[in-house]
Image (cartoon, rainbow, N blue to C red):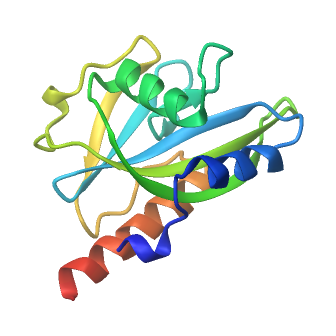
Amino acid sequence: MHGDLIPTDPATLAAIEKAAGDLPVSAKAVMVCRGHILLLRQRKNGWWELPGGRHDEGDATVLDCLVREVTEETGLAPTVIGVLDHWVRVKANGRKRFVIDFLVTADVAPDPENIRLSREHDRALFLAPGVEPPEPLLEGYRRAIDKVARLLDRRLTA
């Protein structure tokens, strides 16, 4: 499963962040909990998203950002497996953000009651294998979810 992922060594992550140029960086997590993928619904607009957020000045690395944001938004401590992809998100107001999608795991039963939501979100949802993600959802997040679903399918059928 890990052969399809980009490694998280410092040199590789530095090269990915360098590709962002002057764009702000966000670290997002496709979090797998016992075969299910966690999604969060934004309170302000009802859009579904992956846990994670913007790299702050206090974050020494993008991995620090990822762990901090995922823990703040879910109450869970993620185990980082690898980088899935990186892409540029263009927001409705035209501003751009460089998004790095990571595969992470957490050893918790896939039950929304196990998630401690931040004020940013009003609902947690665990996608079972083979279930399509809800709408609205950014296409970049959908691609990352689909990639993880394929990786999980391969692992289960190997």
Q: Residue at x 61, y 13 (%)?
A: 58
Q: Residue at x 36, y 68 (%)?
A: 149
Q: Describe residue 144's horizontal placement relative to residue 114 as left or right.
A: right
Q: Residue at x 29, y 71 (%)?
A: 152
Q: Nearer the viewer, residue 135 or 155?
A: 155
Q: Is residue 46 visible?
A: no
Question: Which quarter of the image is occupied by the C terminus?
Answer: bottom left
Q: Position of residue 90 (x, y in %)?
A: 80, 42
Q: Position of residue 50 (x, y in %)?
A: 46, 41
Decide: is 158 above or below 34: below
Query: Residue 77 appears in which quarter of the rendering?
Result: top left
- Tag count in the figure? 0
Q: Is residue 95 visible?
A: yes
Q: Nearer the viewer, residue 65 or 121?
A: 65
Query: Residue 3 appears in which quarter of the rendering?
Result: bottom left
Q: Nearer the viewer, residue 45 or 9?
A: 9
Decide: is 32 above or below 131: above
Farthest-out residue, bottom: 158
Q: Nearer the viewer, residue 106 or 131?
A: 106
Q: Position of residue 60 (x, y in %)?
A: 60, 24
Q: Describe residue 82's horizontal placement relative to residue 132 as left or right.
A: right
Q: Position of residue 123 (x, y in %)?
A: 32, 27
Question: Which quarter of the image is occupied by the N terminus?
Answer: bottom left
